[in-house]
């Protein structure tokens, strides 16, 4: 199985601050009881016994609960953080309806995962056929929070039973002991998506290591699962400057689709998205910004065999 990963780490993963943590796949969520697009974070009111926490592997199938419904998110065990969410396809921005076999969801110390994405996770659960999951099983009432507070969430179909439709795909989030995040938007990437993006490119984007940025304008009506609309006309910046030999944009006319890479394009198209290869650990941002607004600047990098996906949410006065 080809090893590829998608992880979102904000600048504050390494900075030790929690004011610009990625929650729900966007910049700016903080797990302190506040609400942010794609994920609502709340302090736990009670701490249940591990035996009372539902196992994500036995969540109701789409036939029992419609895929457009969220699932109840239990409180975590002591010193743990509960993550409840849904997996979306990075190519289509659609949640995984009637996905069989279901994707697996794994939980890691984020910085350890970045250093070695082949490491064993804390534990693994399976999403239901709608892509919904809870970070709990019979022995893990939530995810253990590392000293850095930063966790990685990874999805894959595991390559088991002859199935290998998805590459390993992950994102990052800050956790607080005793807290939880609900309706968290996470992502899955298909091998076919990487192959489609990589036509005429060798090795593939996933093999090289690629950063995927999705620029979102929250002032516009929401499109798909996003807390706003993807913004066209943005150029990604790396360490403060555009790097046209490293970035690739999409010519898709559909705002939620990421299918057609156009090597001649130098700004985001209708889907507000960019692929960036061969980067050191530096600040990523975008330009231009509308008057009174700015694109957040956050640390990110590319790692061979990995894809970093980050929704970049425009910040306005």
Image: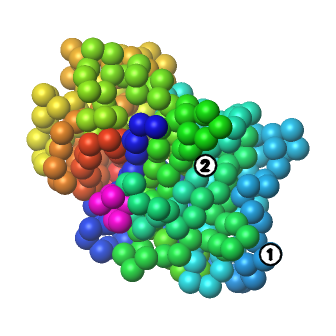
Q: Reading the chain from its start, which is encountered first: label 2 or label 1? A: 1
| SS state under label 2 | strand
Image x and y of residue 133, in percent: 67, 54
| Residue 150 sits in quarter | bottom left
- Which residue extends farthest right? 64
Query: Whole-percent x and y of residue 313?
Result: 39, 47
Magenta stretch, overall SS: helix
Observer-nearest residue: 202 or 99?
202
Answer with left or right where residue 123 lies relative to residue 136: left
Identified at 27% across, 14% down, the residue is 200
Residue 115 falls within the magenta-colored stretch: yes
Q: Residues within 10 Å of mark 2 (few under 14, many from 20)?
A: some
The residue that label 2 is drawn on is 104
Residue at position x 44%, y 52% in the image: 171
Q: Nearer the viewer, mark 2 or mark 1?
A: 2
Q: Give the residues in magenta.
A: 111-116
Q: Residues within 10 Å of mark 1 (few under 14, many from 20)?
A: few
Q: Which residue is mark 1?
A: 52
Secondary element at image label 1: helix
Instruction: Name the spot of residue 51 as percent of width and height, x first.
Output: 78, 77
> Front-most of 200 and 178?
200
Query: In the rendered view of the protein, which quadrant contains the C terminus?
Result: bottom left
Q: In the displayed structure, would residue 275 be above or below residue 200?
A: below
């Amino acid at each position: 199985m080809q090893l590829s990963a998608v992880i979102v780490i904000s600048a504050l993963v390494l900075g030790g601050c929690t004011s610009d943590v990625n929650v729900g796949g966007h910049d700016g969520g903080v797990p302190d009881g506040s609400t942010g697009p794609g994920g609502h974070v709340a302090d736990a009111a009670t701490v249940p016994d591990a035996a009372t926490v539902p196992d994500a592997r036995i969540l109701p199938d789409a036939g029992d609960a419609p895929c457009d419904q969220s699932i109840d998110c239990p409180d975590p065990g002591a010193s743990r953080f509960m993550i409840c969410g849904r997996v979306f396809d990075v190519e289509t921005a659609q949640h995984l309806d009637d996905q069989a076999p279901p994707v697996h969801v794994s939980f890691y110390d984020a910085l350890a995962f970045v250093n070695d994405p082949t490491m064993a996770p804390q534990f693994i659960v399976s999403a239901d056929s709608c892509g919904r999951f809870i970070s709990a099983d019979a022995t893990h009432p939530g995810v253990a929070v590392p000293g850095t507070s930063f966790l990685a969430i990874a999805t894959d179909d595991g390559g088991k039973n002859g199935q290998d439709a998805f590459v390993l795909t992950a994102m990052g989030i800050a956790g607080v002991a005793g807290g939880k995040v609900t309706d968290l938007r996470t992502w899955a990437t298909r091998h076919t998506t990487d192959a489609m993006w990589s036509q005429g490119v060798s090795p593939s984007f996933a093999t090289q290591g690629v950063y995927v940025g999705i620029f979102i304008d929250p002032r516009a009506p929401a499109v798909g699962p996003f807390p706003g609309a993807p913004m066209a006309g943005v150029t990604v910046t790396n360490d403060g400057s555009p790097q046209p030999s490293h970035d690739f944009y999409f010519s898709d006319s559909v705002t939620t689709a990421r299918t057609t890479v156009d090597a001649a394009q130098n700004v985001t198209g209708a889907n507000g998205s960019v692929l960036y290869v061969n980067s050191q650990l530096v600040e990523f941002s975008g330009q231009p910004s509308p008057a009174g607004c700015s694109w957040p600047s956050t640390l990110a990098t590319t790692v061979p065999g990995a894809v970093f996906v980050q929704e970049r949410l425009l910040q306005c006065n």
